Image (cartoon, grey):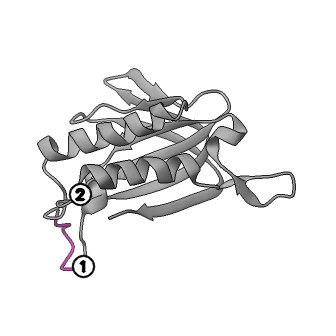
Amino acid sequence: MIAVVQRCSRGEVRVGGDRVGALGERGGLVVLLGVETGDTIDHARKMGDKLIKLRIFEDGDGKMNLAVAEVGGSILVISQFTLAGDCSGGNRPSFVRAARPEAAEPLVNEVVARIAESGLVVETGRFRTEMKVDILNDGPVTLIVRVG
């Protein structure tokens, strides 16, 4: 399981012009989440825990030392199978490592549930739809997180 995690002051996802998910007014994390073949419920739980505890917000000394809950932020999770794309063999990406939608959707839902269980506000995009994502990345701070 792979995620691109961005520390953001604004994040929003729209489907057909309608807003379906957004960060709260205090910002937080926008997570683009890819599920790969072989990922399990355990991987999804570990990813959820990692996102909850990831310390990429600045403390009073300007060091990345605070998690999203400590700054009053929320999390926006957007599934993105293209993260599993492999461009090493040519100019057209191969998506053979991407999990099939019927396998990926329950794992994305488990990541979201794990975050929600922590008490954090979490919103999502809409699985299997064309989404428009608007992100204002702070820093910029962007990390690639892998579990599995």
Marks 2 and 1: CB-CB under 8 Å? no
The verdict on residue 91 being magenta is yes
Up-down: is 117 above or below 94? above
| Residue 61: image location, x then y, percent | 87, 58
- The residue positioned 30% from the left and 53% from the top of the image is 42
Tag shown at residue 39: 2
Q: What element carries label 1?
A: loop
Percent from the top left, x then y, of residue 60? 86, 51
Front position in the image: 147 or 144:
147
For the stretch drawn in magenta, the main secondary structure is loop
Q: Which numbered circle lies on residue 75?
A: none
**Could you say which is closer to the camera, residue 115 or residue 95?**
115
Mark 1 or mark 2, which is nearer the start of the sequence?
Answer: 2
Q: Which corner quadrant holds the C terminus?
A: bottom left
Q: Name which residue type carries label 2.
A: Asp
| Quarter-of-image position of residue 18 | top left
Label annotation for residue 88: 1
Residues drawn in magenta: 89-94
Mark 1: which amino acid?
A: Ser
The reply to whether the magenta stretch includes residue 121 is no
Point 54% across, 46% down: residue:
52
Q: How crowded is mark 1: few (under 14 residues within 10 Å), some or many (20 or more)?
A: few
